[in-house]
Structures are given as C-alpha cells and as structure tokens.
Image: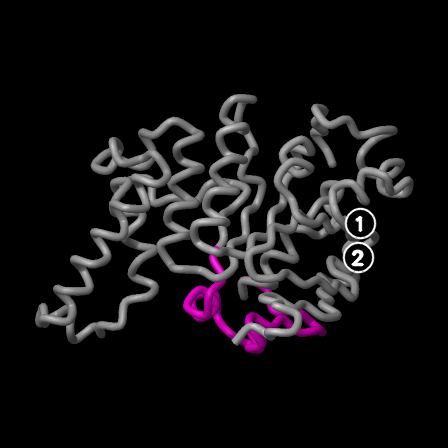
Amino acid sequence: MTDPKTNKLLQVTGLTKSFGGIKALQDMSLDIKAGELVALIGPNGAGKTTFFNCLTGMYQADHGQVQLKGNLLKGLKPSEITQVGIARTFQNIRLFDQLTVIENVLVGCHASLQSTFIDAIFRTTRHKEEEEEAKEKSYQLLEKLNLLQHAQSKADSLPYADQRRLEIARALATEPKLLLLDEPAAGMNHSETAELDQLILQLKEEFGLGILLIEHDMKLVMKISDRIFVMDRGAGIAVGTPSEIRANKKVIAAYLGEEIEEDAGAENA
C-alpha cells in the first residue's frame, strides 16, 4: 500500500545507468505522490527518456532502486511492471498501425486479464466474460478521449493528435497507478496542445493517477505541473513548484533562457 504518512506512490533512489563509459543517469532520486503530476525537464540528452526506460524495465539500472507503492521493481520485465501499475507513452508514437482503434485499446486491456491461454483456447465462461468487460472498458476509454467515432478505423488513418490520444487510451487500459507521458505534445499545434493539457488534468483527477511527464512545451509544463524536476547530464539539479523553478536563476540561465513568461513556450527546455 501507499505509505499513509508520505502518500508516496513512486520512490526512486540513487538510480544510476551507464552505457560504456558514459553515465546516462547519475544518482537520480525522485518521488511522486498519489494524484500528483510531476514534470521532468532538461536539455536534449539530459537522460530523461533513459530514466523512463529504467522505470519501465526496458533498461536495468546499474545501481539504485525503484519502488511503486513500496514494492521493489528491480529485475522485473516490462510486461511485469505494466501489471504492477506503470504505463507509458512514447516520444515517437508506437501504435499497432494496422489494427483498428478499438483493437489497440483492447491490447492494453489484455495486460490485466486473469483468464489463461487455456481459457482462450476453449472459450471458457471466464474468458468470454473478461473479453466482454474489456470491450466495454475500451469503448468507455475511447469516449472519454473523444475517439469513439474512430473505433473501427485503422490506427494509422487517424490525425496525428488523435494518434497521441489513442496511445494514452491504450496506456490507461492497463489500469495504471502511475502514467509516464513522454513528450505528449510533440508535433501538436497550439489548439491541440491546449486541449491536451486539459485532458491530462481531467484524467489525473478522474483516475486518481500519479503522472510523470517529459515535455518541452514550457507553457504546458508550467500550467499543469504540481512540481517540476530538472535534469542535466543524467543528474537532478533542481526540484520545486512551477513558481520556484521559474525563479531559480540556475535553471533559467542554463535551461529555460533568460526569463520565463506565463504565455511563452520553449522548444528546447
């Protein structure tokens, strides 16, 4: 269970990862409370996506530990970490292009099915009931993300912004406790980004999710984040509320330009 004293959902301590002689992560420590949205920012090459890959089991860290609700995740495979309660999207959209929109979401639902391979072969009552529940949940998710009208369309036929939404829907289908969003606003125009930030806040409240967000759009980051964690060269250099980060001279000088305006974005935060 989540620690009732700290309400910490995710606890990362001393995470270190090297590739050859290059340290991609250096003693990274970070925590997220249940229902909190934390943005992870830093220049390209700072180690943000490597950090995501270590959290989700795509990379195994050299040192340090990751806990979700007090459960150590060391050594778990990506599929096992998904079942524990961490889901993610990717900077470069990774949908099953030739499957329909509803089929993509059903793939996410299958991560939490209890029926076995044998149940599927013999079409047992348990398997049929779970399949019906998965379909109902998938349609509900598509409705929440305004994709229901595209349910039978091929995923690769969707407009770019809707493909982003579909990837989020598929991640939500795994019933995560923590959702990792890797540059969800990348490639979106101003109006699409505005709709996205409202969607992220809505999902956080409705599903009670912890969210860890990598994003270069600083207007979005400053608007929706509870806290911001700043990285450089694989290490954390600052953490605080948006107002604290906005006033942090080291962060401003090194990563966000000379000043941050409420309505100004930054392409390479």
268 sits left or right of 146 in the view: right
Instruction: Check disc 2 and report the residue beneath it.
Output: 235
Q: Give the magenta-colored segment's residue range.
A: 58-87
Colour pattern: one colour
Compared with residue 207, is residue 216 higher up or lower down, i.e. above or below? Answer: above
- Amino acid carrying mark 1 in the image: Asp
Q: Which mark is residue 232?
A: 1
- The spot of residue 168 in percent (x, y) is 43, 45
Q: Is residue 72 magenta?
A: yes
Helix, strand or loop for disc 2: strand
Report which quarter residue 13 is drawn in: bottom right
Report which quarter residue 263 is drawn in: top right
Q: Residue at x 16, y 68 (%)?
A: 127
Q: Residue at x 37, y 49 (%)?
A: 170
Q: Which mark is residue 117?
A: none
Compared with residue 111, is residue 181 higher up or lower down, i.e. above or below? Answer: above
Compared with residue 257, is residue 94 higher up or lower down, i.e. above or below? Answer: below
Mark 2 packing: few (<14 Cα in 10 Å), some, or many (20+)?
Answer: many
- Amino acid carrying mark 2 in the image: Ala
- The spot of residue 50 in percent (x, y) is 65, 55
Assign the C terminus to one quadrant of the image: top right
- The spot of residue 60 in percent (x, y) is 61, 69
Which is nearer the eye, 145 or 171? Answer: 145
